[in-house]
Image (spheres, rainbow, N blue to C red):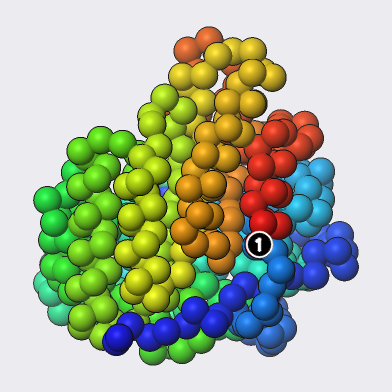
Amino acid sequence: MSIEMHSRRRFLVGSASAATLTAFGTGGLSSLSAFATPSRLSDDGGSFVPYGAAVRSDALSADSSYREAVIVNCQLVVPESELKWLELRPAPDQYRFGKADAIIDFARQNGIRVRGHTLAWYGALPKWTESIATRADAERELTDHIETVVSRYKGAIPSWDVINEPLVDWPESAASLRPSIWARRLGPDYLRLALKATAAVDADAQLVINEYDVEYAGARFSAKRSALVQLLRSLRDRDVPLHAVGLQAHLFAGRTIDRDGLQSLLTEIKALNLDVLITELDVIDRELPSEIHERDKLVADLANQFLGAVHEVIRPKAILTWGLSDRYTWVPIYFKRRDGMPNRPLPLDADLKPKPLFEVIEQFRHRA
Ligand code: 9MR
Protein backbone atom coordinates (compact mmCIF):
# COMPACT_ATOMS: atom_id res chain seq x y z
CA MET A 1 0.00 0.00 0.00
CA SER A 2 1.77 3.08 -1.09
CA ILE A 3 -0.84 5.80 -0.96
CA GLU A 4 -0.23 7.73 2.25
CA MET A 5 -2.87 6.65 4.66
CA HIS A 6 -4.61 9.46 6.40
CA SER A 7 -7.95 7.89 7.09
CA ARG A 8 -7.44 8.71 10.75
CA ARG A 9 -7.73 12.34 9.83
CA ARG A 10 -11.23 13.52 10.12
CA PHE A 11 -13.01 16.77 10.14
CA LEU A 12 -13.37 17.88 13.67
CA VAL A 13 -16.78 19.39 13.99
CA GLY A 14 -16.43 23.10 14.52
CA SER A 15 -17.99 24.66 17.57
CA ALA A 16 -20.72 26.29 15.56
CA SER A 17 -22.88 26.53 18.67
CA ALA A 18 -20.39 28.98 20.10
CA ALA A 19 -20.72 31.02 16.94
CA THR A 20 -20.71 34.73 17.22
CA LEU A 21 -22.00 37.10 14.61
CA THR A 22 -19.14 39.09 13.22
CA ALA A 23 -18.85 41.74 10.61
CA PHE A 24 -17.89 40.27 7.26
CA GLY A 25 -15.29 41.68 5.00
CA THR A 26 -14.21 44.56 7.16
CA GLY A 27 -10.68 44.65 5.93
CA GLY A 28 -10.08 40.91 5.78
CA LEU A 29 -7.04 39.42 7.39
CA SER A 30 -4.35 41.74 8.48
CA SER A 31 -1.65 39.13 8.90
CA LEU A 32 -1.03 35.44 8.61
CA SER A 33 -1.09 35.15 12.37
CA ALA A 34 -4.83 35.43 12.02
CA PHE A 35 -4.69 31.82 10.84
CA ALA A 36 -3.11 30.63 14.06
CA THR A 37 -6.23 28.80 15.25
CA PRO A 38 -5.46 25.09 14.94
CA SER A 39 -7.86 23.62 12.45
CA ARG A 40 -6.14 20.59 11.04
CA LEU A 41 -8.15 17.54 10.30
CA SER A 42 -7.90 15.58 13.47
CA ASP A 43 -9.11 12.38 14.95
CA ASP A 44 -12.25 13.38 16.77
CA GLY A 45 -13.86 9.94 16.79
CA GLY A 46 -16.80 12.07 15.68
CA SER A 47 -20.26 10.79 16.30
CA PHE A 48 -21.70 12.67 13.38
CA VAL A 49 -20.65 13.68 9.91
CA PRO A 50 -19.92 17.40 9.55
CA TYR A 51 -22.20 19.32 7.21
CA GLY A 52 -21.12 22.27 5.15
CA ALA A 53 -21.93 24.38 2.12
CA ALA A 54 -20.30 26.37 -0.63
CA VAL A 55 -20.50 30.05 0.30
CA ARG A 56 -20.20 33.33 -1.61
CA SER A 57 -18.21 36.22 -0.20
CA ASP A 58 -20.44 38.88 -1.76
CA ALA A 59 -23.58 37.37 -0.21
CA LEU A 60 -21.88 36.88 3.17
CA SER A 61 -21.00 40.51 3.20
CA ALA A 62 -24.31 41.93 1.89
CA ASP A 63 -26.92 39.59 3.36
CA SER A 64 -26.95 39.23 7.14
CA SER A 65 -29.75 36.65 7.27
CA TYR A 66 -27.80 34.40 4.90
CA ARG A 67 -24.66 34.94 6.96
CA GLU A 68 -26.56 33.92 10.11
CA ALA A 69 -27.95 30.83 8.40
CA VAL A 70 -24.40 29.76 7.48
CA ILE A 71 -23.25 30.25 11.07
CA VAL A 72 -26.16 28.32 12.50
CA ASN A 73 -26.13 25.42 10.05
CA CYS A 74 -22.62 24.82 8.79
CA GLN A 75 -19.66 23.16 10.45
CA LEU A 76 -17.77 23.56 7.20
CA VAL A 77 -17.69 26.02 4.33
CA VAL A 78 -16.00 25.99 0.95
CA PRO A 79 -15.59 29.17 -1.09
CA GLU A 80 -17.73 28.67 -4.22
CA SER A 81 -15.31 30.58 -6.48
CA GLU A 82 -12.96 32.70 -4.36
CA LEU A 83 -10.08 30.20 -4.38
CA LYS A 84 -10.23 29.48 -8.11
CA TRP A 85 -7.45 30.76 -10.34
CA LEU A 86 -9.82 33.21 -12.00
CA GLU A 87 -10.36 34.98 -8.67
CA LEU A 88 -6.87 34.62 -7.25
CA ARG A 89 -4.73 35.31 -10.31
CA PRO A 90 -5.69 38.42 -12.32
CA ALA A 91 -2.19 38.46 -13.85
CA PRO A 92 0.79 36.09 -13.95
CA ASP A 93 2.68 38.02 -11.32
CA GLN A 94 -0.32 38.90 -9.16
CA TYR A 95 -2.30 37.28 -6.37
CA ARG A 96 -5.59 38.71 -5.11
CA PHE A 97 -6.53 37.10 -1.81
CA GLY A 98 -9.06 39.58 -0.40
CA LYS A 99 -12.28 37.61 -0.98
CA ALA A 100 -10.85 34.27 0.08
CA ASP A 101 -9.32 35.84 3.18
CA ALA A 102 -12.67 37.35 4.09
CA ILE A 103 -14.38 33.94 3.97
CA ILE A 104 -11.63 32.33 6.01
CA ASP A 105 -11.71 35.14 8.53
CA PHE A 106 -15.49 34.77 8.85
CA ALA A 107 -15.18 31.00 9.30
CA ARG A 108 -12.42 31.29 11.86
CA GLN A 109 -14.36 33.79 13.93
CA ASN A 110 -17.36 31.51 13.97
CA GLY A 111 -15.69 28.17 14.63
CA ILE A 112 -16.39 26.91 11.11
CA ARG A 113 -13.86 24.84 9.16
CA VAL A 114 -12.91 25.58 5.56
CA ARG A 115 -12.29 23.35 2.56
CA GLY A 116 -10.26 24.63 -0.37
CA HIS A 117 -11.55 24.45 -3.95
CA THR A 118 -9.58 24.11 -6.22
CA LEU A 119 -5.92 24.07 -7.30
CA ALA A 120 -5.81 22.23 -10.62
CA TRP A 121 -8.95 22.47 -12.77
CA TYR A 122 -9.63 23.10 -16.43
CA GLY A 123 -12.31 25.66 -15.55
CA ALA A 124 -12.26 29.20 -14.14
CA LEU A 125 -8.76 29.89 -15.42
CA PRO A 126 -7.75 33.44 -16.31
CA LYS A 127 -7.14 34.11 -20.01
CA TRP A 128 -3.42 34.64 -19.50
CA THR A 129 -2.90 30.97 -18.61
CA GLU A 130 -3.56 30.11 -22.27
CA SER A 131 -0.19 31.59 -23.13
CA ILE A 132 1.72 29.18 -20.91
CA ALA A 133 3.77 27.78 -23.75
CA THR A 134 6.12 25.09 -22.51
CA ARG A 135 6.17 22.14 -20.21
CA ALA A 136 8.68 23.84 -17.93
CA ASP A 137 6.54 27.00 -17.72
CA ALA A 138 3.42 25.00 -16.92
CA GLU A 139 5.19 23.09 -14.19
CA ARG A 140 6.54 26.30 -12.72
CA GLU A 141 3.19 28.12 -12.83
CA LEU A 142 1.24 25.26 -11.31
CA THR A 143 3.80 24.60 -8.58
CA ASP A 144 4.28 28.28 -7.71
CA HIS A 145 0.53 28.77 -7.48
CA ILE A 146 0.08 25.77 -5.19
CA GLU A 147 3.04 26.73 -3.00
CA THR A 148 1.79 30.30 -2.62
CA VAL A 149 -1.87 29.50 -1.99
CA VAL A 150 -1.50 26.38 0.16
CA SER A 151 1.22 27.88 2.33
CA ARG A 152 -0.82 31.05 2.87
CA TYR A 153 -3.74 29.01 4.20
CA LYS A 154 -1.77 26.30 5.95
CA GLY A 155 -3.58 25.47 9.17
CA ALA A 156 -6.67 27.36 8.01
CA ILE A 157 -7.63 25.07 5.15
CA PRO A 158 -7.12 21.47 6.24
CA SER A 159 -8.66 19.88 3.15
CA TRP A 160 -8.13 20.72 -0.53
CA ASP A 161 -9.81 19.71 -3.76
CA VAL A 162 -6.37 19.60 -5.30
CA ILE A 163 -7.68 18.15 -8.54
CA ASN A 164 -11.15 19.00 -9.84
CA GLU A 165 -12.94 17.10 -12.61
CA PRO A 166 -9.90 15.45 -14.22
CA LEU A 167 -11.79 13.18 -16.62
CA VAL A 168 -13.69 13.87 -19.84
CA ASP A 169 -17.41 13.16 -19.91
CA TRP A 170 -17.08 9.78 -21.61
CA PRO A 171 -13.58 8.52 -20.83
CA GLU A 172 -12.07 5.44 -22.45
CA SER A 173 -9.51 5.11 -19.68
CA ALA A 174 -7.67 7.01 -16.99
CA ALA A 175 -5.72 8.63 -19.82
CA SER A 176 -8.87 10.42 -21.03
CA LEU A 177 -8.10 13.66 -19.24
CA ARG A 178 -9.96 16.89 -19.86
CA PRO A 179 -7.96 19.08 -22.22
CA SER A 180 -6.85 21.82 -19.83
CA ILE A 181 -3.68 23.87 -20.14
CA TRP A 182 -2.25 21.55 -17.47
CA ALA A 183 -3.09 18.36 -19.33
CA ARG A 184 -1.93 19.86 -22.66
CA ARG A 185 1.45 20.99 -21.41
CA LEU A 186 2.18 18.38 -18.74
CA GLY A 187 0.10 15.36 -19.75
CA PRO A 188 -1.15 13.11 -16.93
CA ASP A 189 1.84 14.15 -14.87
CA TYR A 190 0.01 17.32 -13.84
CA LEU A 191 -2.00 15.23 -11.37
CA ARG A 192 1.12 13.95 -9.63
CA LEU A 193 2.77 17.37 -9.68
CA ALA A 194 -0.23 19.09 -8.11
CA LEU A 195 -0.75 16.49 -5.41
CA LYS A 196 2.94 16.34 -4.52
CA ALA A 197 3.30 20.10 -4.45
CA THR A 198 0.33 20.38 -2.07
CA ALA A 199 1.67 17.64 0.22
CA ALA A 200 5.12 19.24 0.20
CA VAL A 201 3.71 22.51 1.52
CA ASP A 202 1.17 21.10 3.97
CA ALA A 203 1.88 17.53 4.99
CA ASP A 204 -1.25 17.50 7.16
CA ALA A 205 -3.73 18.64 4.55
CA GLN A 206 -6.30 16.19 3.28
CA LEU A 207 -5.73 15.89 -0.47
CA VAL A 208 -8.83 15.24 -2.55
CA ILE A 209 -9.66 14.42 -6.16
CA ASN A 210 -13.13 15.76 -6.85
CA GLU A 211 -15.28 14.29 -9.67
CA TYR A 212 -18.87 14.28 -10.90
CA ASP A 213 -21.28 12.10 -12.89
CA VAL A 214 -20.24 8.91 -11.10
CA GLU A 215 -23.62 7.89 -9.70
CA TYR A 216 -25.89 7.27 -12.68
CA ALA A 217 -26.97 4.33 -14.79
CA GLY A 218 -25.70 4.31 -18.37
CA ALA A 219 -22.59 3.60 -20.41
CA ARG A 220 -21.19 7.12 -20.11
CA PHE A 221 -21.37 7.06 -16.33
CA SER A 222 -20.03 3.56 -15.92
CA ALA A 223 -17.10 4.59 -18.16
CA LYS A 224 -16.47 7.50 -15.80
CA ARG A 225 -16.47 5.19 -12.77
CA SER A 226 -14.02 2.74 -14.38
CA ALA A 227 -11.67 5.49 -15.51
CA LEU A 228 -11.74 7.08 -12.06
CA VAL A 229 -10.82 3.80 -10.35
CA GLN A 230 -8.04 3.28 -12.89
CA LEU A 231 -6.77 6.79 -12.22
CA LEU A 232 -6.77 6.30 -8.45
CA ARG A 233 -4.91 3.00 -8.80
CA SER A 234 -2.29 4.50 -11.06
CA LEU A 235 -1.65 7.29 -8.56
CA ARG A 236 -1.31 4.75 -5.77
CA ASP A 237 1.08 2.66 -7.85
CA ARG A 238 3.29 5.70 -8.29
CA ASP A 239 3.28 6.69 -4.59
CA VAL A 240 1.39 9.89 -5.23
CA PRO A 241 -0.07 11.38 -2.04
CA LEU A 242 -3.86 11.30 -2.01
CA HIS A 243 -6.31 10.87 0.85
CA ALA A 244 -9.85 11.09 -0.39
CA VAL A 245 -12.23 11.18 -3.32
CA GLY A 246 -14.85 13.90 -3.47
CA LEU A 247 -18.15 12.90 -5.04
CA GLN A 248 -19.70 16.13 -6.21
CA ALA A 249 -23.23 14.72 -6.32
CA HIS A 250 -24.97 17.27 -8.49
CA LEU A 251 -27.99 14.97 -8.67
CA PHE A 252 -30.16 15.24 -11.77
CA ALA A 253 -33.80 14.51 -11.17
CA GLY A 254 -34.69 12.48 -14.24
CA ARG A 255 -31.54 10.36 -14.27
CA THR A 256 -31.43 6.99 -12.54
CA ILE A 257 -28.93 6.36 -9.79
CA ASP A 258 -27.01 3.14 -10.44
CA ARG A 259 -26.90 1.78 -6.90
CA ASP A 260 -24.71 -1.20 -7.78
CA GLY A 261 -22.36 0.83 -9.95
CA LEU A 262 -21.97 3.52 -7.32
CA GLN A 263 -21.44 0.98 -4.58
CA SER A 264 -18.79 -0.91 -6.58
CA LEU A 265 -16.96 2.38 -7.11
CA LEU A 266 -17.10 3.10 -3.38
CA THR A 267 -15.90 -0.41 -2.57
CA GLU A 268 -12.88 0.14 -4.83
CA ILE A 269 -12.19 3.51 -3.23
CA LYS A 270 -12.41 1.94 0.20
CA ALA A 271 -10.06 -0.87 -0.84
CA LEU A 272 -7.51 1.78 -1.78
CA ASN A 273 -7.78 3.15 1.77
CA LEU A 274 -9.16 6.43 0.54
CA ASP A 275 -11.83 8.41 2.32
CA VAL A 276 -14.96 9.74 0.64
CA LEU A 277 -16.46 13.19 0.92
CA ILE A 278 -19.72 14.39 -0.58
CA THR A 279 -18.57 17.76 -1.83
CA GLU A 280 -21.23 19.54 -3.94
CA LEU A 281 -24.59 17.94 -3.28
CA ASP A 282 -27.67 19.57 -4.79
CA VAL A 283 -30.60 18.42 -6.88
CA ILE A 284 -31.16 19.77 -10.35
CA ASP A 285 -34.94 20.07 -10.39
CA ARG A 286 -35.52 21.26 -13.94
CA GLU A 287 -37.49 18.13 -14.86
CA LEU A 288 -39.55 18.01 -11.65
CA PRO A 289 -43.18 19.15 -11.27
CA SER A 290 -43.98 22.76 -10.47
CA GLU A 291 -45.89 22.11 -7.26
CA ILE A 292 -43.52 22.98 -4.47
CA HIS A 293 -44.36 20.35 -1.85
CA GLU A 294 -44.21 17.58 -4.38
CA ARG A 295 -41.01 18.95 -5.89
CA ASP A 296 -39.28 19.34 -2.53
CA LYS A 297 -40.22 15.79 -1.61
CA LEU A 298 -38.82 14.39 -4.88
CA VAL A 299 -35.62 16.40 -4.37
CA ALA A 300 -35.26 14.94 -0.87
CA ASP A 301 -36.07 11.42 -2.10
CA LEU A 302 -33.31 11.54 -4.69
CA ALA A 303 -30.74 12.71 -2.15
CA ASN A 304 -31.98 10.04 0.24
CA GLN A 305 -31.49 7.39 -2.42
CA PHE A 306 -27.98 8.61 -3.20
CA LEU A 307 -26.84 9.05 0.41
CA GLY A 308 -28.41 5.69 1.33
CA ALA A 309 -26.39 3.92 -1.35
CA VAL A 310 -23.20 5.66 -0.23
CA HIS A 311 -23.80 5.00 3.43
CA GLU A 312 -24.25 1.26 2.92
CA VAL A 313 -20.62 1.09 1.78
CA ILE A 314 -18.80 3.95 3.48
CA ARG A 315 -19.51 6.75 5.92
CA PRO A 316 -18.49 9.98 4.19
CA LYS A 317 -16.10 12.22 6.11
CA ALA A 318 -18.20 15.26 5.30
CA ILE A 319 -21.37 16.20 3.45
CA LEU A 320 -21.33 19.56 1.69
CA THR A 321 -24.03 21.05 -0.50
CA TRP A 322 -23.17 23.47 -3.31
CA GLY A 323 -24.82 26.41 -1.63
CA LEU A 324 -26.98 26.49 1.49
CA SER A 325 -30.12 28.28 0.38
CA ASP A 326 -32.06 28.41 -2.89
CA ARG A 327 -31.44 32.17 -2.69
CA TYR A 328 -27.90 31.59 -3.97
CA THR A 329 -27.42 28.71 -6.37
CA TRP A 330 -25.54 28.09 -9.61
CA VAL A 331 -28.32 25.80 -10.94
CA PRO A 332 -30.34 28.40 -12.93
CA ILE A 333 -27.22 29.38 -14.87
CA TYR A 334 -27.55 26.12 -16.81
CA PHE A 335 -30.77 24.45 -15.71
CA LYS A 336 -33.53 27.04 -15.52
CA ARG A 337 -36.99 25.57 -15.24
CA ARG A 338 -39.28 25.77 -18.25
CA ASP A 339 -42.25 26.88 -16.10
CA GLY A 340 -40.29 29.98 -15.11
CA MET A 341 -40.38 29.06 -11.42
CA PRO A 342 -37.18 29.37 -9.39
CA ASN A 343 -35.07 26.26 -8.90
CA ARG A 344 -35.13 24.63 -5.45
CA PRO A 345 -31.96 22.52 -5.34
CA LEU A 346 -30.69 23.19 -1.79
CA PRO A 347 -31.47 22.36 1.87
CA LEU A 348 -32.90 25.78 2.78
CA ASP A 349 -35.46 27.58 0.65
CA ALA A 350 -35.02 31.16 -0.57
CA ASP A 351 -36.46 32.37 2.77
CA LEU A 352 -33.82 30.30 4.58
CA LYS A 353 -36.39 27.82 5.89
CA PRO A 354 -35.38 24.15 6.03
CA LYS A 355 -36.81 21.88 3.35
CA PRO A 356 -37.16 18.08 3.35
CA LEU A 357 -33.66 17.86 1.83
CA PHE A 358 -32.32 19.42 5.02
CA GLU A 359 -33.94 16.67 7.11
CA VAL A 360 -32.50 13.95 4.87
CA ILE A 361 -28.99 15.32 5.31
CA GLU A 362 -29.55 15.60 9.06
CA GLN A 363 -30.54 11.94 9.24
CA PHE A 364 -27.44 10.79 7.38
CA ARG A 365 -25.17 12.97 9.46
CA HIS A 366 -26.32 11.19 12.58
CA ARG A 367 -26.41 7.67 11.19
CA ALA A 368 -23.71 5.42 12.70
O1 9MR B 1 -21.12 27.40 -8.65
C1 9MR B 1 -19.96 27.87 -9.33
C2 9MR B 1 -20.31 29.04 -10.20
O2 9MR B 1 -20.77 30.12 -9.40
C3 9MR B 1 -19.08 29.44 -11.01
O3 9MR B 1 -19.44 30.43 -11.90
C4 9MR B 1 -18.56 28.24 -11.79
C5 9MR B 1 -17.26 28.58 -12.51
O4 9MR B 1 -16.27 28.89 -11.61
O5 9MR B 1 -18.30 27.15 -10.92
C6 9MR B 1 -19.42 26.72 -10.19
O6 9MR B 1 -19.04 25.68 -9.33
C7 9MR B 1 -18.71 24.44 -9.94
C8 9MR B 1 -17.56 23.84 -9.15
O7 9MR B 1 -16.48 24.73 -9.08
C9 9MR B 1 -17.12 22.52 -9.74
N1 9MR B 1 -18.24 21.61 -9.91
C10 9MR B 1 -19.41 22.14 -10.57
C11 9MR B 1 -19.86 23.44 -9.88
C12 9MR B 1 -21.17 23.96 -10.49
O8 9MR B 1 -20.99 24.30 -11.84
Q: What residue would you read off at disc 1? A: 368
Q: Position of residue 306 (x, y in %)?
A: 49, 43
- Does the image show residue 83? no
* Label 1 neighbour load within 10 Å: few <14, some 14-19, many 20+: few
Q: Quadrant of the N terminus?
A: bottom left
Q: Nearer the viewer, residue 341 or 28?
A: 341
Q: Amino acid at mark 1?
A: Ala
Q: Is mark 1 within 8 Å of ligand 1?
A: no
Identify the residue shown where x is 66% and y is 69%.
Answer: 113
Identify the residue shown where x is 49% and y is 62%.
Answer: 314
Q: Is residue 216 left or right of residue 187?
A: right
Q: Nearer the viewer, residue 31 or 309?
A: 309
Q: Quadrant of residue 349?
A: top right
Identify the residue shown where x is 58% and y is 48%.
Answer: 321
In this view, 361 is above or below 13: above
Q: Position of residue 90 (x, y in %)?
A: 41, 61
Q: Quadrant of residue 98?
A: bottom right
- Does the image show residue 92? yes
Q: How many labels sit on residues?
A: 1
Identify the residue shown where x is 49% and y is 31%.
Answer: 284
Q: Is residue 146 left or right of residue 113?
A: left
In this view, 335 is above or below 40: above
Q: Quadrant of residue 29?
A: bottom right
Q: Position of residue 38 (x, y in %)?
A: 68, 85
- The local secondary structure at tag 1 comes to loop
Q: Position of residue 100 (x, y in %)?
A: 58, 64
Q: Quadrant of the C terminus?
A: bottom right
Name the outermost residue toward the top: 339
